[in-house]
Image: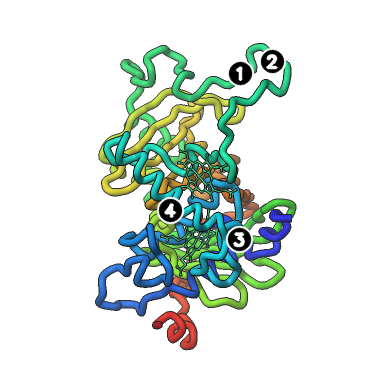
């Protein structure tokens, strides 16, 4: 049932926001969109929303990501806590409980972990509203040798992840750059137009993706209801849904969109991190892959998995920071093929706690003219602006 609902709603929003699409869109329309160029600093949640008691002081644009974190941690929908169309109301008991839980979480971390956010909603809830306090019994006969080792324990060389004499992170970045064609070939890419299919649940819909240097990207998903758009123009990102005003991207979504839009990503990796560490190997599909964790100034880390043989990037995990915890997005890259002198993945699967989809590209054109007009953000309709002003 939940699944059906999610499918009926705008599919493309999963590209950036993840589940509960319509609710998020409605909630943002109710409280969002400061006038562009507005002089006031970032609004606080309590200035934008009507009934904020615990999350006072967080930037307003982190309220919805926090809600998405809570929703994913408990494995519920927004309506578990909220009255539809009236998010400010406290009529539902779980919403009241959730406030107490937030305070409890902050207190646990303050009192036991020096204020570091070690314990989150997910630590206890693990995708269910009712945490389990009792260990579960074994459901099946144990299969010999099938026990999945935890990644940290799975170090092939017994160096506990330090890889004392192993290759350095930079060596993996270099090998990857070579594997996709080398920096000269990458530099020559000025634009890319891809056509393919996006698969979401049991639905397949055509998608076109236009990229232009240095970091512009827009995708059009041709749903039966009209086109859905995910766009980044180098500094701003937005989402468009059929028959609704465009929605602006914020914080972590922009970080992610900028990364996806970078046509020269493979060449930029080496300069991206303040620190990068090789943390052993993991199996991805049939192959071993090396995990490199890259730290960035003021942003959550990235996890990059490089195929041990080919050197290609086969998985990227990034995190969206929210006041309550980090939301992961995992992208698996596959079907690398040559496209005009560089190797690019023709298939990728993007997975979040709230959903996943796969894009399979069928045709790529490199260095064809792409009109800058494609990346101009549509203006919000006038009544929408008025609505947002109060
Ligand atoms: C587990 C309960 C829970 C879930 C699930 C949940 N929320 Fe909330 N939400 C809250 C609580 C609690 C507050 C008030 C926070 C405070 O007082 O600081 C809140 C506040 C809000 C507000 C501010 C309303 C106002 O005007 O004061 C919005 C908007 C909102 N949530 C949207 C959402 C959306 C969208 C979802 C689904 C993605 C969602 N919430 C899921 C518990 C929840
Ligand atoms: C330290 C463990 C722990 C943490 C952290 C935690 N919870 Fe809980 N939560 C529980 C337990 C245990 C219950 C069940 C209590 C019961 O069964 O009466 C619960 C119950 C709830 C309920 C009521 C569920 C229902 O069925 O009505 C909500 C809502 C909730 N938690 C939200 C949250 C949110 C949101 C966070 C993060 C801000 C959070 N919890 C963090 C342990 C935790």
Tell me whether the residue at label 2 lies in contact with that at label 3, contact meaning CB atoms closer than 8 angstroms: no
Q: How many residues crowd mark 3 within 10 Å: few (<14), some (14–19), many (20+)?
A: some
Q: Is residue 379 left or right of residue 6?
A: left
Q: Secondary structure at mark 3?
A: helix
Mark 3 or 1: in front is 3
Please give the name of the residue rendered at 44% of the width and 86% of the height, measured from the top-left corner: 386
Mark 2 sits near ligand 2, with its Cβ under 8 Å away? no
Q: Which residue is mark 3?
A: 79
First reached walking from the N terminus: tag 2 or tag 3: 3
Mark 2 or 3: in front is 3
Q: For the C terminus, which image quadrant?
A: bottom left
Coloured how? rainbow
Q: How many residues crowd mark 4 within 10 Å: few (<14), some (14–19), many (20+)?
A: some
First reached walking from the N terminus: tag 4 or tag 1: 1
Q: Which residue is mark 4?
A: 256
Q: Position of residue 326 (x, y in %)?
A: 42, 46
Q: Position of residue 206 (x, y in %)?
A: 67, 61
338 and 147: which one is in front?
147
Tell me whether the residue at label 4 lies in contact with that at label 1, contact meaning CB atoms closer than 8 angstroms: no
Tell me whether the residue at label 4 lies in contact with that at label 2, contact meaning CB atoms closer than 8 angstroms: no
Q: Which residue is mark 1?
A: 147
First reached walking from the N terminus: tag 4 or tag 2: 2
221 and 127: which one is in front?
127
């Amino acid at each position: 049932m939940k699944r059906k609902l999610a499918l009926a709603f705008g599919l493309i929003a999963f590209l950036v926001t993840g589940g509960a699409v319509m609710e998020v869109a409605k909630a943002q329309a109710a409280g969002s969109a400061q006038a562009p160029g507005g002089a006031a600093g970032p609004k606080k949640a309590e200035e934008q929303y009507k009934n904020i008691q615990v999350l006072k002081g967080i930037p307003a644009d982190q309220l919805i990501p926090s809600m998405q974190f809570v929703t994913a941690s408990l494995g519920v929908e927004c309506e578990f806590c909220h009255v539809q169309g009236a998010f400010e109301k406290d009529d539902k008991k779980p919403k009241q409980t959730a406030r107490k839980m937030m305070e409890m979480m902050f207190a646990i971390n303050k009192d036991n972990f020096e204020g570091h956010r070690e314990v989150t909603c997910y630590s206890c809830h693990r995708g269910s509203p009712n945490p389990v306090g009792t260990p579960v019994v074994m459901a099946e006969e144990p299969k010999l040798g099938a026990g999945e080792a935890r990644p940290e324990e799975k170090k092939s060389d017994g160096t506990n992840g330090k890889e004392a004499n192993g290759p350095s992170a930079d060596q993996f970045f270099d090998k990857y750059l070579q594997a996709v064609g080398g920096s000269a070939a990458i530099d020559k890419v000025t634009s890319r137009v891809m056509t393919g299919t996006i698969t979401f649940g049991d639905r397949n819909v055509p998608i076109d993706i236009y990229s232009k240097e240095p970091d512009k990207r827009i995708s059009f998903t041709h749903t039966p209801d009209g086109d859905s758009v995910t766009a980044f123009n180098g500094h701003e990102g937005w989402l468009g849904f059929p028959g609704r005003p465009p929605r602006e991207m914020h914080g972590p979504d922009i970080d992610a969109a900028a990364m996806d839009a970078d046509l020269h990503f493979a060449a930029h990796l080496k300069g991206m991190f303040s620190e990068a560490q090789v943390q052993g190997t993991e199996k991805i599909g049939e192959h071993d892959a090396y995990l490199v964790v890259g730290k960035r100034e003021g942003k959550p880390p990235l996890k990059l998995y490089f195929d041990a043989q080919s050197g290609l990037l086969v998985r990227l995990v990034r995190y969206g920071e929210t006041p309550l915890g980090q939301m992961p997005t995992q992208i698996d890259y596959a079907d690398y093929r040559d496209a005009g002198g560089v190797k690019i993945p023709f298939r990728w699967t993007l997975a979040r706690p709230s959903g996943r989809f796969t894009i399979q590209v069928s045709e790529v054109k490199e260095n064809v003219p792409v009109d800058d007009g494609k990346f101009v953000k549509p203006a919000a309709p006038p009544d929408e602006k008025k609505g947002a002003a109060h």
